[in-house]
């Protein structure tokens, strides 16, 4: 994609984030913009890096590790897509955060690999708020029990919750899910569980990040809004 278009897109996203912050009475620095670069070439990522954004999201392990090798090591990579247990070993020491933990089995595998490498791995629990069959994530009523188990793993640190809201025409329809996820985050934070901080809420994508910010998102994951449409055939 043309670098000038990416830069224009970024300005637009920044303007909208700032406006949402103003509406919600929040500070801009409460929100991390994650540039979702899946399917996009390294050259596009370099354009965004040049605009002082250094947090990127990828949803596939192989693509993340390939880009990791080619790009500066101070990039903070977030794995936002489903993670298979047999692939944890390839990324556990390369990512700043894994957003998609939805089982004890996966968390135990992260524990095993993080311990081997002598690191603490930051994770979010993925919640399927709209109970969509096509989506990963745990149902809201199962979140606390899962957190209580994962909290026992010393090399896995739970930072908060993540959700992928339904793909809707009208972003306003997703507000209720964002609001409920934030409340769930607060409820669990109040329990003061050891090794669990619950300061992060990863919610909002190109279609609905402004609503998510109004409802308390601390991380928004924006792909199309920055890099343009994805073309899965040529990637
Ligand atoms: C692709 C993806 C995004 C970004 O989606 P856009 O609509 O292009 O902004 C955000 N989160 C997850 C988990 C994704 O897989």
Image (tube, grey):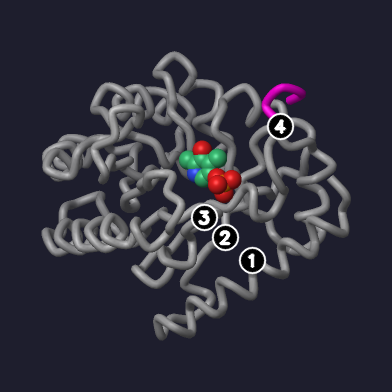
Does residue 172 sit above or below 89 in this rendering?
A: below
Circle 1 crowding by C-alpha within 10 Å: few under 14, some 14–19, many from 20: some
Please report contact status of discs 4 and 3: CB closer than 8 Å, yes or no.
no
Going by the picture, which residue comes out furthest to the top? 86
Please report contact status of discs 1 and 2: CB closer than 8 Å, yes or no.
yes
Label 3 secondary element: loop
Label 3, label 2: how far apart the Cα atoms are = 14 Å
**On the image, which quarter does residue 177 sit in?**
bottom left
Q: Give the numbered dot on residue 33.
A: 2
Q: Give the numbered dot on residue 207.
A: 3
Q: Is residue 11 left or right of residue 20?
A: right
- The residue identified by callout 4 is 231
**On the image, which quarter does residue 191 sit in?**
bottom left
Q: Earlier in the sequence, mark 2 or mark 4?
A: 2
Residue at point 19% right, 38% down? Answer: 139
Label 1, label 2: how far apart the Cα atoms are = 9 Å
Q: Give the numbered dot on residue 57.
A: none
- The residue identified by callout 1 is 13
Q: The magenta stretch spans which residues?
A: 231-235
Label 2, label 4: how far apart the Cα atoms are = 22 Å
Please identify the quadrant where the C terminus is shown: top right
């Amino acid at each position: 994609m043309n670098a000038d278009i990416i830069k224009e897109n970024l300005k637009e996203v920044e303007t909208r984030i700032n406006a949402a912050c103003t509406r919600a009475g929040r500070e801009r620095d409460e929100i991390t913009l994650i540039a979702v670069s899946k399917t996009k070439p390294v050259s596009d990522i370099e354009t965004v890096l040049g605009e002082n954004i250094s947090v990127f999201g990828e949803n596939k392990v192989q693509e993340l590790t390939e880009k990791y090798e080619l790009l500066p090591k101070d990039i903070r990579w977030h794995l936002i897509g489903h993670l298979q247990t047999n692939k944890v070993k390839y990324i556990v020491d390369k990512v700043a955060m894994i957003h998609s933990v939805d089982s004890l089995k996966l968390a135990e595998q992260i524990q095993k690999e993080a311990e081997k490498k002598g690191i603490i791995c930051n994770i979010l629990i993925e919640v399927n708020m709209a109970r969509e069959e096509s989506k990963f994530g745990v149902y809201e009523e199962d979140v606390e029990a899962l957190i209580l188990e994962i909290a026992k793993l010393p090399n896995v640190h739970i930072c908060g919750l993540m959700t992928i809201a339904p793909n809707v025409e009208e972003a306003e329809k997703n507000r209720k899910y964002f609001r409920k996820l934030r409340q769930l985050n607060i409820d669990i934070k109040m329990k003061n569980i050891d090794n669990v901080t619950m300061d992060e809420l990863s919610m909002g994508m190109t279609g609905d990040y402004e609503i998510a910010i109004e409802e308390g998102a601390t991380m928004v994951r924006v792909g199309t809004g920055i890099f343009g449409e994805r073309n899965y055939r040529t990637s």
